[in-house]
Image (tube, rainbow, N blue to C red):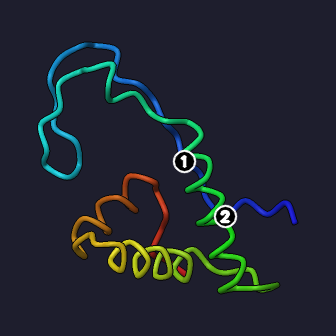
């Protein structure tokens, strides 16, 4: 229906240095790790559908949206801390 539910940004690491991602894994810059845009778009579409199913016609607050996404991330195998870190990076607020 045109409401913005969140914002995701994907940027390649152009400096070529090794770096640590937010999960603590060390990844060197490698062409094999390029983002699969089709998979990313499919996953985002799935998340949007899940949000629509959960909230229907309601307009969830940032806190409600964060709690829903946090629960979903934990159910998919992330720790609560990893889910919090990920949502913080997406700047999905916890204030109502």
How many residues crowd mark 2 within 10 Å: few (<14), some (14–19), many (20+)?
A: some
Left or right: 86 in relation to 2 = left
**Quarter holding residue 77:** bottom left
Q: Count every numbered label the image shows and give the total.
A: 2
Q: Residue at x 59, y 51 (%)?
A: 7
Q: Residue at x 49, y 63 (%)?
A: 92
Q: Residue at x 14, y 23 (%)?
A: 18
Where 54 sits versus 14, above or below? below
Secondary element at image label 2? loop
Q: In the rendering, which numbered label is found on residue 8?
A: 1
Left or right: 29 in relation to 8 = left
The picture places residue 51, in percent across and down from the top left corner, at 64, 76
Where 61 sits versus 3, above or below? below
The picture places residue 26, in percent across and down from the top left corner, at 12, 37
Q: Residue at x 79, y 63 (%)?
A: 3
Quarter of the picture holding the C terminus = bottom right
Q: In the rendering, which numbered label is found on residue 82?
A: none
Quarter of the picture holding the N terminus = bottom right
Q: CA distance from mark 2 to mark 1?
A: 10 Å
Left or right: 91 in relation to 2 = left
Which residue is tagged 2?
5
Where 59 sits versus 15, above or below? below
């Amino acid at each position: 229906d045109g409401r913005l539910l969140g914002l995701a940004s994907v940027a390649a690491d152009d400096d070529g240095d090794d770096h640590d991602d937010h999960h603590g894994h060390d990844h060197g810059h490698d062409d094999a790790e390029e983002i699969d845009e089709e998979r990313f778009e499919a996953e985002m579409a799935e998340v949007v559908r899940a949000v629509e199913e959960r909230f229907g016609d309601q307009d969830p607050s940032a806190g409600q949206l964060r709690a829903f996404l946090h629960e979903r991330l934990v159910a998919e195998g992330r720790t609560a801390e990893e889910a919090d870190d990920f949502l913080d990076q997406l700047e999905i607020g916890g204030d109502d």
